[in-house]
Image (cartoon, rainbow, N blue to C red):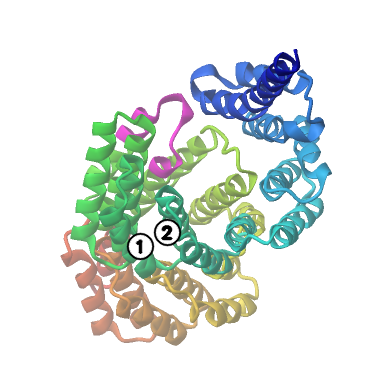
Amino acid sequence: MLMWIIAVTIAVVVLAAAYEVIAFQYLPKHIFRARKKSGYDATITRLRILGRLPSLAGAKAKLHTWFYLGDMLYQARRYAEALEPLRAVCSFGTNPLDPPARKRIAECLDALGRPDEAARERLAAGFVADAIGNPLLSAKTKAEMFSREQKYDEACQQYELAMGLATGPDFRLKRTLRLKLTLANMNAGHPSRVLGLSEQGLLDDPDPLHKIIFHRMAGLACANLGRLEIADIHSQKAYDAAVQLGNTNQQADSLGVLAYVRHQQGRLDEAIDLSRRAVEAAGEIGNRVANTCLFETLMTMGRYQDAQNAISQSRESTVMFVPSKERRSTGAMNLGLARAAGELGNFNQALDLVASATKDFQNNSMSAYCDSIRFWLLAERGDAASEWMVATESKVKSVDSPGAQRDIFGMLTRGALATGDYALGLRFAMCLLDLGPHPVDLPRAHYLIGECRRGLGEIDAARSAFNEAIGLGIETIWTKRARERLAEMADV
């Protein structure tokens, strides 16, 4: 009889333990991983049902269920609803799910327009990660916190620390950390580091999706560094790999990057064709990379109204569910619209758009670029603008990206021309030329040098510069303006 009681007791304990593990650890993860197939609503409903099941171990056993439910509500952009289950995760003191839950809470608060509360949650996530005593978790948490706050250099340092700490058998974790480190360096404007990390990732990482992203990042980095032939190869490989994988989103992104490279090479008709193919491949969700490249190509050709329409189409793309990324993307779109509005003479509208965009950027290169555009617009409007020129010059020295430096010096040159300071404009234009512009940017550089020379009374040197712009054989708005200026100077 005693043995029977012991056997029954053991069986009950085993069954109870199995119930707890299956109901509150296995099933939440399984349901969450099947979310793409099941859809948001079905996944959320199933997780809610699990949350209502009784637990012999108490409410704390449901941490995984609440975390995944909160994460799903966040991804479904139901931010206010997501706060309750995520805060439930944090209500049981220090636990490994607390830091990622707090990060999600911060992103929900960001989306709900409560940035101060979001900042406090991110700070708390770092403190909790430290308190847990897991250095790897602490580094990962801080890296993601810095990324969300656009402190990309600090994020890179923490991702590097996390990679050094990820020495266990989980190779997938280390590969994911390298990918995030690569993206953080891209956002920080460090193309040389991006290229090195991408090349290492292509050697070590067998994940087919990661390989597509590493090829694409390598393509962008090489383009920024002026290695356009290698950039073209990487971008084409990214697209080919995306086709092989059957991933239409990655195909669209890769076509967009390939279009960007062709634009930089001066192959403008090809860039427009590839951009439109990328938009078509993206379908209803839209593709901001492709629309942005189409915008830049149309701007280069002087088709400013068409360029505005292209960047406006980006606003119709599916909103990113990470609010900080959406804000950064919106800032880039506003900056593009500001440039187009400025070219069309709508300076007040353009300045309002720059002011809006500036709030969405905190890293040095984009801040300097915003200041340079503001300098140009104010100078064109006839306002005092020297403070913005000084602010830009103080920042550009620490900008690590040659591409960003070229854009900044181009705007500084145009601003100086608008103020009538031709000597200053020439200094900026020569800085632009010394940076080795891409083929598509050479007509602009030579045209601007020509305008500065003409303003200084150096007529022969100005003619030579305008002829340089035309002789490159790349038809841009700057080539057209150079021809017009030479025609005006025919009798001089």
- Say which residue label 1 marks: 197
Q: Is residue 201 visible?
A: yes
Find out whether the residues at labels 1 and 2 contact each other: C-beta distance under 8 Å. yes
- Tell me the crowding category of disc 1: few under 14, some 14 to 19, or many 20 or more residues within 10 angstroms, Cα based: many
Q: Nearer the viewer, residue 148 or 459?
A: 148
Label 1 element class: helix
Query: Measured from the top left, where is residue 103 in percent x and y?
Result: 68, 48
Q: Residue 51's quadrant in the figure?
A: top right
Query: Which residue is painted at 79% across and 25% down in the image?
Result: 56
Q: Nearer the viewer, residue 62 or 321?
A: 62
The kind of residue tagged 2 is Thr
- Say which residue label 2 marks: 182
* Quadrant housing the N terminus: top right
Query: Magenta-highlighted stretch: main secondary structure?
Result: helix
Determine whether 73 is above or below 231 in the image. above
Determine whether 112 is above or below 403 in the image. above
Q: Residue 487's quadrant in the figure?
A: bottom left
Image-based side of 169 in relation to 331, left or right: left
Image-based side of 175 in relation to 26, left or right: left
The kind of residue tagged 1 is Leu
Residue 328 image label: none
Determine whether 47 is above or below 99 in the image. above
- Tell me the crowding category of disc 2: few under 14, some 14 to 19, or many 20 or more residues within 10 angstroms, Cα based: many
Image-based side of 481 in relation to 64, left or right: left
Query: Which residue is painted at 76% across and 44% down in the image?
Result: 109
* Quadrant housing the C terminus: bottom left
Query: Measured from the top left, where is residue 313 in percent x and y?
Result: 49, 35
* The magenta segment: 276-291
Query: Which residue is painted at 63% across and 30% down in the image?
Result: 25
